[in-house]
C-alpha cells in the first residue's frame, strides 16, 4: 500500500506538471498563431491576418496582462521564454497595426500601436534573421512617427571623460612568485596558492585581487560611495564616467573573475595602462577558468580574453619594455556550448623585460614584429590550376592564384538603396538596379563621393562607381551569394576584367531556410532527405551557372549556420558538417577548374566537429567579431584542431557609438579594422600560426533597414558586443555611408576606415 506522504507528493507533482503543461500548451498555441499571422501577412491576406491576431488577443490577453503586471523592465536574458504569451499577444497587436497601415486605415493603425505601447511596454519580439530581440514598444512608436510624418531623429550628447586617479597604484610589474606558489603550470591541474596575502595586496594595488582594502580609504570612493547604490553596474560600464564605473565594479555583485576583467577594461579605457595590465594578469593567475556568456549564449572565456588583451597593450605600449612570456590557456572540449565538459590547461606566463633584439623590432608598427620563417616545399595541394590552397613543409598554408601567393582582401558588397528592406519585401537586386533608366547599373558604376559632406553632388564630384572606389581601396574580392536574387553575370565579368576584383561565390546551405525549401519555422533540418535534396540542387545550380566564369575565385558554403536561425545546425552540428562536406564533394565533381571550397561558420563553435566531418572543405572560414584586439587564438585553434587554411569571412565594427562624437566613433572603427587586418597578416604563411589566407570586411555600405525603419538611419543599439560603447549599431557597419539618404543609391561618404585600408592594402 502506498504511504500517505508519497500519495500527496504524487498529487502535488501531478498538479505542478499539469499547470506547466497547460502553460506550455498555451504558449505553443499562441506562438503558432503568431507564425500563422506573419505568414498570412506575407501572402497579403490582410483580412485573415486581422482574424488570426484578434483570436490570439481574445484567448491570451488575460494571461498577457498578468505577466505584464509583474515587470518593471525587460526580462533578463535567458528568462525571456517565461513571458512568451505576453510577447505573442503584443506581437499580434503590432501585426494588426501594420496591417491597418498597409490597408490605408491610418487612424486605426495609430490607435492599435498606442494600445500595445500602453499595455505591454516590456514586450519584445525575436528576430531570427539577426538573432536579436526588438522592443515592440519602440518599433510601434517608430511606425506611428512614420505615419504622422514626424521626425524620429535620435540625438546623443557627447560625454566628457571622468578619469580615474588611483589612490594606491602598487608596484609594476608584480612578481607573484614572491607572494605565493605556482603548481601544475601548463597542465589541467594549474593552481596558484597565495602565501602572503598582505604582501600581494600591497604589491598589486587598488582594484586588483586580493586587494579589497585600498578602495575603502580612497578619498574619491568615500566621496561618492552613497551615490553608488543607485548606479546600475552594467549600464555604467561602457560610458565615459570611468571613475564611477571603476568604483561601482569594485563592489559589483558579479563573480570575482568577471569583476576583475571589467575593472581591467575600465582601467584600460581610462588610461592607467600599467594598472590595467596588472588587472588582466590577475585574471590569468587567479581566475583563468572563469567564463561568461555572449549575447548569443555561447561561452566567453575571460582568461583567454585577458591574455590577448595583455599582448595587445604591451605591443601598443613598447615604452613599458615588457613582454608576456610562456602564457597559454587551452580548453579541451571548448568548441561547444557545454561548459561542464571543459578542461583548462593553464600557464599564466610571466611579464619579463624585453631584450635588445626585441627592442629593435618592437616599435609601434603596423606590420608583424618578426622576420618571416622559411616555408619549405609544397607538400599538399587543394584546388585546381588557377586557384589552389597549398600546405608547406613547415605546416603553413597559402592561396596561390596563377602560382603566385594571393591574400584575400575582401569585402561584403550589397549596396541596398535607402528605403528598401528585405523585411518588407522591397529590396531590389543591385546587379540589375537602374533607377535613372540610363542603361547603366547604378551603384557599381554611378556612385560618387561627397567630398565636402554637403549631401549635394557638386560639379567636381563626378560619378566613379563603387567598383572603382573598391579597386582604389585595394579590394581584390567581394563576397556574394547566388541566392535569393539572380546575379547579373555581365556585371561580375566587368568587375573582374576591368577592376581586377574576384567573387567569392556562395550558397546559404539552408541558413534562413534558403535553398532547402523548408518553412521558416522550424527551418532546415540537415537530416531531412527532402531538405538535403533541395539544398544539393541549389548548390548544383550555382556551380553549373557560374563554373565557367573567370571572376569566381572560391566557392563558399553557409553563413553562421551553427548559430541556428531557421536551421538546426546548432542542434545537429555533426549532421550539418557532414552535409556541408557532401556539398563540397558535389561542387568539386561539377567544377572543371576545381576551385577551393570554403565554409562560413560562426566563430569557432563546433570547430572540432567540423574537423572530423568536413575533410573535403579546403578553407575554414568564420564570421568573427572579437573586438579591437584582433582575433585572439582563432588561428592557433584552427591550426591545432582542423589543420586547414583559415579566413575571417566577416568582421567589422560600427562607426557610431553612444556618448562619443562621430569623429571618435570613426576613429574607433578604423583602429578596429587596422588591428584586425594586422592580425590577419601576422598569422599568414611565414608568420604566427601560418594558416591565415585573408579576410572579408563587413561591409562596404551602411544599410538603413536593419533596425526596422528603412528610411531612417537608426542609431539604435541592437545587442551587446565588443565595440566602443559596448553595443552593435548594425546600420553603421559600412566603410562608406549614404549621407542623409536622399541621394541613395549613388552618394558615398568614405569613412576613415576606407582610407586606412587604402593605405594598408596598397
Image (spheres, rainbow, N blue to C red):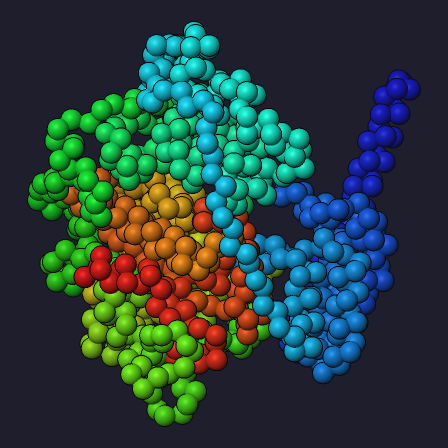
Above or below: residue 623 compared with residue 42: above
* Horizontal and vertical percent position of residue 413: 36, 68
Q: Quadrant of residue 751?
A: bottom left
Q: Residue furthest bottom?
A: 438
Picture residue at 16% right of the left edge, 33% below the top? 359
Q: Residue furthest top?
A: 195
Horizontally, residue 386 falls left or right of residue 47, namely left
Quadrant occupied by the N terminus: top right
Picture residue at 31% right of the left edge, 81% below the top? 461
Horizontally, residue 184 falls left or right of residue 260, namely left
Picture residue at 20% right of the left edge, 27% below the top? 354
Above or below: residue 286 compared with residue 556: above
Horizontally, residue 20 falls left or right of residue 754, namely right
Judge whether residue 480 can be spotted in this image. no
**In this figure, what is the number of numbered marks?**
0
Judge whether residue 325 can be spotted in this image. yes
* Horizontal and vertical percent position of residue 260: 48, 28
* Horizontal and vertical percent position of residue 98: 69, 72
Seen from the viewer's position, the closer of residues 406 and 517 is 406
Quadrant occupied by the C terminus: bottom left
Q: Quadrant of residue 115?
A: bottom right
Q: Quadrant of residue 662?
A: bottom left
Amino acid at each position: 500500500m502506498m504511504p500517505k506522504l508519497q500519495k500527496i507528493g504524487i498529487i502535488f507533482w501531478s498538479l505542478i506538471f499539469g499547470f506547466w503543461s497547460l502553460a506550455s500548451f498555451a504558449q505553443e498555441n499562441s506562438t503558432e498563431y503568431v507564425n500563422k499571422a506573419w505568414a498570412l501577412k506575407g501572402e497579403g491576406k490582410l483580412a485573415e491576418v486581422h482574424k488570426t491576431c484578434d483570436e490570439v488577443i481574445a484567448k491570451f490577453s488575460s494571461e498577457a496582462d498578468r505577466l505584464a503586471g509583474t515587470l518593471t523592465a525587460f526580462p533578463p536574458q535567458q528568462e525571456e521564454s517565461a513571458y512568451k504569451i505576453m510577447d505573442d499577444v503584443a506581437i499580434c497587436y503590432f501585426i494588426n497595426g501594420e496591417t491597418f497601415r498597409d490597408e490605408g486605415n491610418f487612424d486605426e493603425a495609430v490607435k492599435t500601436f498606442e494600445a500595445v505601447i500602453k499595455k505591454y511596454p516590456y514586450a519584445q519580439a525575436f528576430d531570427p534573421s539577426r538573432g536579436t530581440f526588438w522592443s515592440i514598444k519602440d518599433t510601434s512608436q517608430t511606425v506611428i512617427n512614420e505615419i504622422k510624418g514626424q521626425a524620429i531623429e535620435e540625438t546623443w550628447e557627447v560625454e566628457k571623460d571622468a578619469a580615474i586617479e588611483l589612490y594606491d597604484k602598487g608596484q609594476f610589474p608584480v612578481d607573484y612568485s614572491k607572494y605565493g606558489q605556482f603548481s601544475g603550470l601548463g597542465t589541467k591541474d594549474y593552481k596558484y596558492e597565495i602565501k602572503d596575502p598582505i604582501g600581494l595586496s600591497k604589491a598589486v594595488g587598488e582594484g586588483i585581487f586580493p586587494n579589497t582594502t585600498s578602495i575603502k580609504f580612497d578619498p574619491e570612493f568615500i566621496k561618492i560611495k552613497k551615490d553608488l547604490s543607485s548606479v546600475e553596474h552594467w549600464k555604467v560600464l561602457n560610458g565615459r564616467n570611468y571613475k564611477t564605473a571603476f568604483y561601482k565594479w569594485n563592489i559589483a555583485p558579479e563573480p570575482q573573475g568577471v569583476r576583475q576583467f571589467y575593472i581591467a577594461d575600465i582601467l584600460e579605457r581610462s588610461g592607467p595602462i600599467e594598472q590595467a595590465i596588472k588587472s588582466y594578469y590577475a585574471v590569468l593567475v587567479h581566475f583563468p577558468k572563469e567564463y561568461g556568456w555572449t549575447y548569443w549564449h555561447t561561452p566567453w572565456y575571460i582568461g583567454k580574453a585577458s591574455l590577448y588583451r595583455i599582448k595587445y597593450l604591451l605591443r601598443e605600449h613598447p615604452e613599458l619594455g615588457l613582454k608576456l612570456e610562456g602564457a597559454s590557456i587551452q580548453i579541451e572540449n571548448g568548441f561547444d556550448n557545454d561548459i561542464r565538459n571543459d578542461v583548462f590547461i593553464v600557464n599564466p606566463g610571466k611579464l619579463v623585460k624585453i631584450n635588445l633584439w626585441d627592442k629593435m623590432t618592437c616599435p609601434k608598427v603596423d606590420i608583424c614584429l618578426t622576420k618571416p620563417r622559411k616555408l619549405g616545399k609544397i607538400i599538399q595541394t587543394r584546388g585546381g590550376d588557377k586557384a589552389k590552397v597549398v600546405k608547406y613543409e613547415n605546416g603553413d598554408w597559402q592561396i596561390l592564384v596563377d602560382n603566385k601567393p594571393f591574400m584575400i582582401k575582401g569585402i561584403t558588397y550589397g549596396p541596398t538603396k535607402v528605403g528598401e528592406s528585405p523585411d518588407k519585401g522591397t529590396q531590389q537586386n543591385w546587379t540589375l538596379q537602374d533607377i535613372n533608366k540610363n542603361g547603366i547599373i547604378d551603384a557599381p558604376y554611378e556612385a560618387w563621393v561627397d567630398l565636402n559632406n554637403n549631401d549635394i553632388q557638386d560639379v567636381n564630384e563626378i560619378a566613379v562607381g563603387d567598383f572603382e572606389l573598391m579597386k582604389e581601396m585595394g579590394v581584390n574580392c567581394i563576397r556574394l551569394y547566388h541566392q535569393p536574387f539572380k546575379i547579373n553575370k555581365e556585371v561580375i565579368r566587368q568587375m573582374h576584367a576591368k577592376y581586377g576584383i574576384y567573387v567569392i561565390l556562395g550558397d546559404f546551405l539552408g541558413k534562413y531556410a534558403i535553398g532547402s525549401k523548408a518553412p521558416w519555422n522550424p527551418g532546415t533540418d540537415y537530416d531531412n532527405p527532402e531538405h538535403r535534396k533541395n539544398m544539393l540542387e541549389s548548390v548544383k545550380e550555382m556551380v553549373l551557372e557560374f563554373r565557367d566564369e573567370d571572376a569566381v575565385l572560391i566557392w563558399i558554403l553557409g553563413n553562421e549556420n551553427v548559430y541556428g536561425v531557421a536551421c538546426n545546425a546548432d542542434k545537429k552540428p555533426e549532421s550539418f558538417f557532414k552535409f556541408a562536406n557532401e556539398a563540397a564533394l558535389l561542387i568539386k565533381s561539377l567544377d572543371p577548374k576545381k576551385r577551393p571550397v570554403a565554409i562560413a561558420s560562426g566563430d569557432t563553435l563546433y570547430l572540432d566537429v567540423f574537423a572530423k566531418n568536413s575533410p573535403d572543405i579546403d578553407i575554414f572560414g568564420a564570421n568573427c567579431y572579437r573586438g579591437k584586439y584582433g582575433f585572439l587564438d582563432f588561428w592557433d585553434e584552427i591550426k591545432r584542431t582542423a589543420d586547414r587554411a583559415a579566413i575571417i569571412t566577416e568582421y567589422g565594427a560600427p562607426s557610431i557609438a553612444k556618448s562619443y562624437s562621430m569623429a571618435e566613433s570613426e576613429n574607433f572603427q578604423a583602429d578596429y579594422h587596422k588591428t584586425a587586418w594586422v592580425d590577419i597578416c601576422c598569422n599568414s604563411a611565414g608568420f604566427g600560426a601560418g594558416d591565415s589566407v585573408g579576410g572579408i570586411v563587413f561591409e562596404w555600405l551602411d544599410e538603413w533597414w536593419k533596425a526596422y525603419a528603412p528610411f531612417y538611419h537608426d542609431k539604435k543599439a541592437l545587442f551587446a558586443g565588443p565595440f566602443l560603447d559596448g553595443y552593435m549599431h548594425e546600420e553603421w557597419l559600412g566603410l562608406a555611408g549614404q549621407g542623409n539618404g536622399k541621394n541613395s543609391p549613388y552618394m558615398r561618404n568614405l569613412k576613415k576606415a576606407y582610407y586606412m585600408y587604402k593605405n594598408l592594402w596598397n
